[in-house]
Amino acid sequence: EVQLVESGGGLVQPGGSLRLSCAASGFTFSNYDMHWVRQATGKGLEWVSSVGTPGESYYAGSVKGRFTISRENAKKSLYLQMNSLRAGDTAVYYCAREGYGHAFDFWGQGAMVTVSS
Amino acid sequence: EIVLTQSPATLSLSPGERATLSCRASQSVSSYLAWYQQKPGQIPRLLIYDVSNRATGIPARFSGSGSGTDFTLTISGLEPEDLAVYYCHQRSNWPLTFGGGTKVEIK
C-alpha cells in the first residue's frame, strides 16, 4: 500500500525557517517524481515545488529562492526546506507522487504550517 | 505561466442529474490535463489523468474530455457523495498550475 506521511509542520515567526519531511512507503521511491502542493485554509490548491528522479528541481515563483526541495532515495524521503517564511506561506503542505499520465496519484495527509508572530 | 480557468465556480444540482465542469487553459496543455476531487475535510483524490483516463477505482460516471485548451469533466448521474470541490491541473509546462476549482453542491 502506497503511503506518504508528512511531518515537520508547526508555528513559526515571520522570517523563520521550517523543514518538512515526507516519508514514503509501499513503492519504489527512487522511480518517481515527487511534488509539494499547498492549500491555504478555504482556498484552492497551489503547486509549490517538484523534484525529478535524477534530482532536478522546480519551484513556483512565489517560493523560488526561499524554499529548497530535496530527496533522499535511500531513506525514501522527500524534504522541503522553507526559509524566510511569510504570513502568505501559511497553509497545509501536501507531498504527492507523480504517477500515471504525469498526474498526482497519491497524496499525503498534509502538514500544517502557520507563519505568525 | 499557464492559467487554468474553471467554470462555473459553484454548481448546484439534484441527485441523478448530469454535472458538466469546464476548465480552460490560457495556452495548449497537450494531453497533460488531470482532474482531482476534494471532499470536505479530505485530501485531494486523482479522478482523471491525460484528459480522459479514469484513475484506479474511480466510478464510470466520471468522465473527462477535451483537447488543447478546453476540457470538461462530466459526472453522469450525480450521487450525494459527489459533493466536493473539483480541480483541474496541468503538467504540460512549468510552473505547474491548478484551476481555482468548481464546487459541486447537491440539492
Image (cartoon, rainbow, N blue to C red):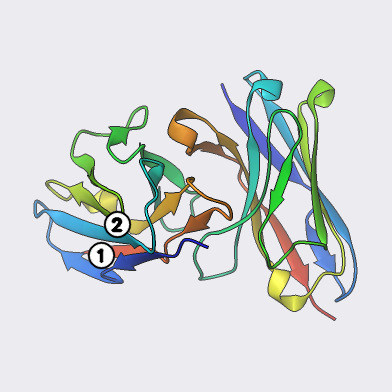
Dot placed on the residue nearer the N-terminal end, 1 or 2: 2
State the quadrant of the C terminus of chain B. bottom left
Type of amino acid under label 1: Glu
Disc number for residue A26: none
Relative to A70, does residue A44 appear above or below in the rendering?
below
Residue B83 bears which disc, if any?
2
Q: Is residue B26 above or below residue A104?
A: below
Of residue B6 and residue A17, the one placed in the foreground of this image is B6
- Residue B62 shows in this picture: yes
Which residue reaches farthest left? B17
Residue A5 x %, y %? 69, 38
Q: Which mark is residue B105?
A: 1
How much space separates mark 1 and mark 2, taking CA atoms? 5 Å
Chain of the residue under the numbered disc 2 shown in the image:
B
Q: Are marks 1 and 2 in contact (CB under 8 Å)?
A: yes
Depicted A25 relative to depicted B38: above or below:
above
Where is residue B54 shown, x and y percent of the image?
A: 30, 33
